[in-house]
Structure formats: C-alpha cells, structure tokens
Image (tube, grey):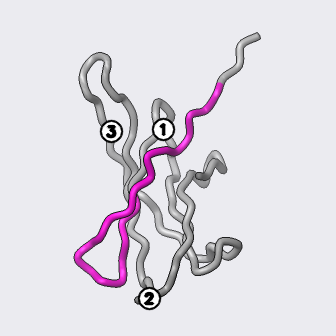
Amino acid sequence: MDIKVKTGHKQIHLGFTENQNEMQVMWVSNPEEYLEPVVFYGEYPTKLNQMEKATTDTYNVGHFGFHGRIYRAVMKNLKFGKKYFYKVGDLKTRTFS
C-alpha cells in the first residue's frame, strides 16, 4: 500500500515590521507548493475574521539540504495590548496549520 503523507506548513515564526500595528508571519513547506497562501487572524481563536495573502520564495540549501518554499504575510491593523490568534495555510487546498 502506497500512502502519501503531506508535510504541510511548518516552522511558523512571527517577526516585527517597521510599523507598530503589524506583525510578519513566516512559514515553510516542502516539497509542496501552495498556490494561494494566506494567514487568517483575529482576537478570538474561533473568529479569525481577518486575512492577508502571502508572498512565496523558493529556498534550496545544497544537494542534501532543505528544498522548499518560504511564505511571508503581514498581519495589519493590530491593536496594541491585544492578544491575537492566527493560522497559516492555503485557500486552494484548504490545508491550514
């Protein structure tokens, strides 16, 4: 029996931008390529009502290194002092972290 396992979205990281009301989220996938990468976010885990599209870059470290894709999206209009929840994924395949 041949079973294919999707590795999905991994190595999800947050980072600052130069704007105080934004956070950048980055993640990788290998070897899959997701065609409509996005981040959903919001103030409640059951209400991720904001969405931003992600950009995609390829990454290759040598013959035996990492081969895959890096995704970046910026969550905008964040309110200072609030806790946010988010998930990254792909609209086309409906796969999310």
Q: In this view, does 4 lie above or below 80?
A: above
Distance from the alpha carbon under mark 2 to that under mark 1: 35 Å
Q: Mark 2 points at which residue?
A: 81
**Element under label 3?**
strand
Which residue is found at the position 30% from the left and 83% from the top? 20
**Residue 83, horizontal then vertical, whole percent:** 51, 80
Q: Residue at x 67, y 76 (%)?
A: 47
Residues at circles 2 and 3 in contact by the CB criterion of under 8 Å? no
Q: Distance between the residues labelled 2 and 3?
A: 35 Å
- Check residue 76 in the rendering and tell me which mark sits there, or answer none: none
Indicate whether 1 appears above or below 33.
Answer: above
Tell me residue 94's x, y (percent): 66, 50
Residue position marked by numbered label 1 in the rendering = 33
Rendered residue at 32%/65% (across/down): 15
In the rendered structure, which disc, 1 or 3, sits on the residue that comes first in sequence?
Answer: 1
Q: Give the range drawn in magenta.
A: 5-25
